[in-house]
Image: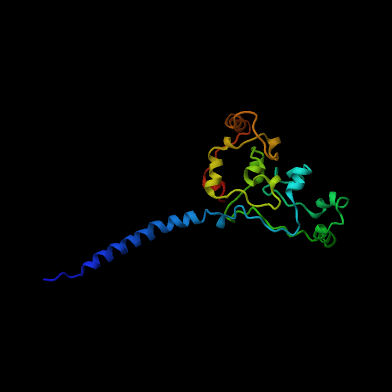
């Protein structure tokens, strides 16, 4: 009796099974890798802003502290965006006729805030409190990178859940004194783990990894 299927059918079935397994197993893996790429996370992508504000000049050259503009970073959930009037504290006398400041002057005259483009954006289902981190000794550059080296600000960290959990599981690796939170390029006077463990105890920092910490 001749065989029911031709010999090539066996090879075809094996090939189909390989493809199915590759799609079922490899598809989710590729998707998980893809959503962690800068293309999705927005990491290292500089944003065009309505005003050509160079953080290198203001932070590094002029020595303006982060909290001068982002005044609520140490006591509120949001770090805050500086109002137009704050810009004019300096620029009503310095470079006040520069074409680069026309947007600022129009904002002041119309009493409409400057439409800054948000750079660091978390999903709506993620809760983040700036004050909880800065008062615990987490420096601005830990999340935002070396702002003093950026002409146009970009998202320095991937901001993935895994990245956040690295800090939440072992905060002593990142903690610094509260009065050094805004210092760019801060280095511990001794081994970071020794400093971090002492600060972790002093500031009563907990290793919060339960879901409700960030998802409320």
Figure check: 139 above or below 15: above
Q: In the rendering, at what x and y percent does residue 37 appear? A: 53, 54
Q: Quadrant of residue 45?
A: bottom right
The residue drawn where x is 47% and y is 57% is 31
Q: In the rendering, at what x and y percent does residue 193 appear? A: 57, 31
Rendered-image quadrant of the N terminus = bottom left
Q: Residue furthest front?
A: 8
The residue drawn where x is 28% and y is 66% is 12
Looking at the image, can residue 208 be seen? no
The one nearer the camera, 125 or 33, is 33
The one nearer the camera, 62 or 69, is 62
The one nearer the camera, 143 or 60, is 60
Q: In the rendering, at what x and y percent does residue 13 appear? A: 27, 65
Number of marks drawn: 0
204 sits to left or right of 96: left
Looking at the image, can residue 49 be seen? yes
The residue drawn where x is 75% and y is 53% is 53
165 sits to left or right of 79: left
Q: In the rendering, at what x and y percent does residue 20 appear? A: 35, 62
Q: How is the image coloured?
A: rainbow
Q: Residue furthest left?
A: 1
The one nearer the camera, 180 or 145, is 145
């Amino acid at each position: 009796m001749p065989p029911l299927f031709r010999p090539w059918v066996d090879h075809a079935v094996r090939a189909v099974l390989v493809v199915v397994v590759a799609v079922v197993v490899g598809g989710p893996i590729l998707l998980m890798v893809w959503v962690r790429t800068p293309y999705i996370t927005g990491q290292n992508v500089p944003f065009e802003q309505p005003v050509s504000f160079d953080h290198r000049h203001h932070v590094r050259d002029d020595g303006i502290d982060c909290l001068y503009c982002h005044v609520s970073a140490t006591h509120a959930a949001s770090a805050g965006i500086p109002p137009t009037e704050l810009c004019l504290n300096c620029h009503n006398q310095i470079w006040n006729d520069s074409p680069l400041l026309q947007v600022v002057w129009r904002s002041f005259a119309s009493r409409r805030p400057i439409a800054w483009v948000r750079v660091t954006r978390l999903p709506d289902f993620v809760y983040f409190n700036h004050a909880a981190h800065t008062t615990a000794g987490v420096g601005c550059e830990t999340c935002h990178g070396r702002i003093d080296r950026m002409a146009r600000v970009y998202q320095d960290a991937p901001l993935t859940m895994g990245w956040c959990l690295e800090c939440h599981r072992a905060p002593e690796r990142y903690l610094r004194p509260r009065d050094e939170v805004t210092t760019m390029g801060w280095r511990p006077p001794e081994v970071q783990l020794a400093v971090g463990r002492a600060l972790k105890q002093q500031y009563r920092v907990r290793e919060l990894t339960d879901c409700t910490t960030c998802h409320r």
